[in-house]
Image (tube, rainbow, N blue to C red):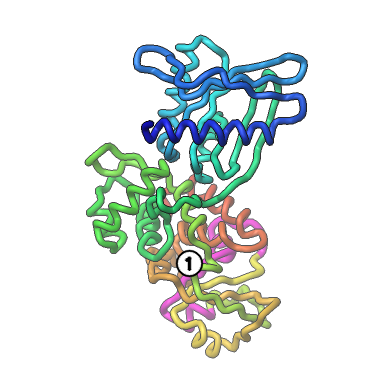
Amino acid sequence: MSNMSILSNTLTRELMGLLEKRLPPGWKVVSKGAEIKAGPGLRLDLLLELRGPEGKKTKMLVEFKNRLEPKLVQPLMDQLRIYAKALGQEAVPMVVSPFISPSTRQSLKEAGIPYADTTGNMWLVSSQPGLYIETQGAERNPNRENRPVQSLKGAKAAEVVRALCDFSPPFGVVELAQKAGVDPGYTSRVLSFIDSEDLIQREPRSPITNVLWRKLIDRWSQDYSFLGSNRIIPCLEPRDINNLPQKLADTTDSLAITGSAAAAAIAPVAPTRMIAAYVKSPEDVMERLGLKPVEAGANVLLAEPYDPVVFERVQVRDGIPYAAPSQTAADLLTGPGRNPSEAQSLLDWMENHESKWRT
């Protein structure tokens, strides 16, 4: 038996089991066959019949994938349409895989393709008969042996992400590596992952022509967080915190204001109640400004940065250096309280004023 046949048999059993557990009372799923011929060179992996109450039913066209990435969702959608047309049936399409990542699941939802994986992630929608099922499984692939090491964790990956966001294409791998200050080989590997997430556009052996930078920042925030990736010292400024950015600028040469204060400088949402700042030596800055370390009630967060890239491409306003909008957006997306909503306002501003922050 081939590896694909073994995979198909395994996924068929898993899918039938998931459906039997998740379907409401009075519903039933019946297999109508596997390896269904759908035309010259076309074979549908599995055909199911979904039977609802009162005798209503619909077909389900199921495609199995050993691995699935956001970049492959559009070809999959085209493939399922071909199957439906060849079989001459109105049907619910569905893709089943051992594991489907959060970003891939989102792409499938946007394309209107129901999905299921063996960890319990499922999204199934049918209009006739009416049915909606959504369940959560694993967020990370539990089978590491079958998964390449892929993420945007770490300083070097962050440098590549920042360069992709801060500079306008076109550019090739070598030019991007120079902009990021990262080895071309590593840059190429990071780009392969970003490409698989469908966050850049390029032809084989050709320069990058487009970067979906807003989605890229959002994807980066899954692996990076302001509070988790940097060394943070919470402090209390007993005086007016609105004067603190200028005091910080007068105190240290290595400074990048981020978070709410940086966003408010260009896209204000509400009065700033917390100052977050990257500095090389938080303890030294605390001592010089008389800030007090606290465990609760902080209104200042001094961050020793995960990488000096936070000081790259700062924007100076009224003598105060603010972190690049791309860095600030990522920091806010992963911050507490209203930070994520402030991030969305900042990202909206960035979309409408790209020439003001991207070179």
Between 353 and 339, which is closer to the camera in this rendering? Answer: 339
- Please name the residue shown 67% across and 18% down the image: 128
Quadrant holding the N terminus? top left
- Please name the residue shown 65% across and 81% down the image: 236
**x, y percentage for residue 58?**
63, 17
Vertical order, 279 against 267 (above or below): below
Q: Which residue is mark 1?
A: 322
Q: Secondary structure at mark 1?
A: strand
Q: How many numbered marks, from 0 up?
A: 1
Residue 359 in view:
no
Vertical order, 303 against 39 (above or below): below
- Please name the residue shown 67% across and 32% down the image: 20
**x, y percentage for residue 112?**
56, 29
Q: Amino acid at mark 1?
A: Tyr
Query: Quick check: is 244 in the magenta stretch?
Result: no
Q: Which residues are magenta?
A: 247-271
Residue 28 in view:
yes
